[in-house]
Amino acid sequence: MRVAIIGAGIAGLATAYFLAKEGIKVEVFEQKFLLHGASGRNSGGITAQFDDEELIKLAIRNEKLYDKLQSEIGFNFLLRKDGYLKLANSIEELGRIELQRKFGLKVKIMEAEEVRNIFEDINTEAFKFASFYPKGAIVFPWAVIWGLAKGCKDLGVKIYDFTKVEIVAEDGKVKGVKSGEFHEADVVVNAAGAWSKEINDKLGIKEEKRIIREEICVTESIKPYIDPYILHASEGLFLSQSMRGEIVGGIVGKSDGGMTSSLDFLIRYAKLVTRLVPKLKGLAVLRQWAGIYDETLDGKPKMCFSEIKGLYQLNGFGRKGMSIGLACAEIASKEILKFTQEE
Amino acid sequence: MRKVVCRCEDLTEEEIIHAIELGYDDIESLKRYTGATTGPCQGKGCLMHILRILSQKTGKSIDELGITTQRPPVNPVPLYILASSEEK
């Protein structure tokens, strides 16, 4: 039994890892270099503060998997659990707090003034309420991908970078993938993130999904002092400080588009971030970039076999990939394992 | 003797070679794994050194290797200057 996975992001690599541990022969195909897609372009905020039961449960499982995989693989993901601070101009915009609490999240609701106990340089005029999730974390996304890739390779998984593949299907059943050469597979996993739609389009599989572009920038480094990951939900502004000391921040994506960065974003971000944390105003922006991700209409990931036999869909994570990707990969690997046993 | 090739991130030639030997042997992966070209100079001081080492180690020409995506801004710009600009 052989499995071919398209996309070497968090979902694809973790699925490969889980399957290889069960003795399945797995190959992973990445169209560009590792980190080219959303797994290499995001800001590493991890939370379970979602407004849906399934997403909350996935995120809670995901937290445990980070701990487990780091020690199992022997690779430091540079994950620090300093909390996730969600700010908003109204209580409603903080999301479904009762639902989150029902599933065990210890979220603390605060008024603006109280937030200064967590981060004293925050401008309390720039928001009204906050929801603080102490188990929220910041991870270095590149280290997650490097670590998963190492874990895969240690188990004998072959990862082909710079290898764009097409799915080969006959009589409603997958046969494998081809780049120049053909790789036979009984199961093909579409874990191509923002590129998963175009792969499905080619097979005539229709899906309603949006491809969203999001921009991020980093400043020069200062001594690390901002602990939590901060998201201003009403304004879409997010920021955190990396262990290198850079302030990494951006604005939640809204529109479709390619991976080009814009001056408009920098100006808007600078206005928002200097209002929220005025002390940062003297820091210089070193670098900006953009990334794209695929979002389903209901905001939930796709994890299922599809109309072509042997084709598994593992995509549609939106901007939540680092928070739920491992848990989704675990479910995917179990379903694929079951499929291979039934065949 | 230490040969420093990236002054912002304090990387030596040996460290770059080590990363290439670990398999980070395309310029985009090498950049990310070592941090080279991501400091205040944004590659203006180090990219050519890194490319030379990568070319020597892999036997590929500089043209074949390509260069990293050049990201704005060209020089660091303080947030307060950006914040005082007009949005479109």
Image (spheres, rainbow, N blue to C red):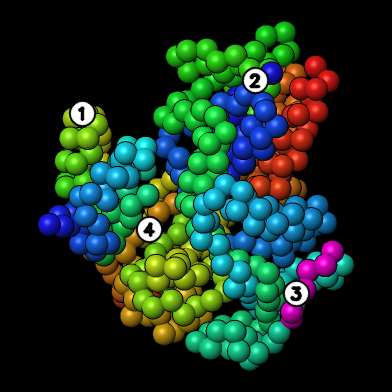
- The reply to whether the magenta stretch includes residue A210 is no
Q: Chain of mark 3?
A: A
* Labels 3, 4: one chain: yes
**Magenta-tinted stretch:** A103-109
Alpha carbons under labels 1 and 2: distance apart = 34 Å
Q: Chain of mark 4?
A: A
Query: Dot 2: what SS?
Result: strand
Q: Are marks 2 and 4 in contact (CB under 8 Å)?
A: no
Alpha carbons under labels 1 and 4: distance apart = 32 Å
User: Residue at 46% across / 56% down in the picture?
Assistant: A215
Q: Percent position (x, y) of residue A233?
A: 63, 69
The amino acid type of the residue labelled 2 equals: Arg
Q: A47 or B85: which is nearer to us?
A: A47
Alpha carbons under labels 2 and 4: distance apart = 40 Å
Query: Dot 4: what SS?
Result: strand
Placement of the C terminus of chain A among the 4 image quadrants: top right
Does residue A177 appear left or right of residue B69 in this picture?
A: right
Q: Nearer the viewer, mark 1 or mark 3?
A: 1
The amino acid type of the residue labelled 4 equals: Gln
Dot 2 or dot 4, earlier in sequence:
2
Disc 2: CA contacts within 10 A as few (<14), some (14-19) or many (>=20): some
User: Residue A2, labelled with which disc?
Assistant: 2
Count of numbered badges drawn on the protein:
4
Q: A340 or A216: which is nearer to us?
A: A340
Q: Which residue is mark 3?
A: A107
Q: Percent position (x, y) of residue A92?
A: 76, 73
Q: Which residue is mark 4?
A: A288
Dot 3 or dot 4, earlier in sequence:
3
Q: Nearer the viewer, mark 3 or mark 4?
A: 3
Q: Which residue is mark 1?
A: B59
Instruction: Write down the quadrant of residue B60 in the picture.
Output: top left
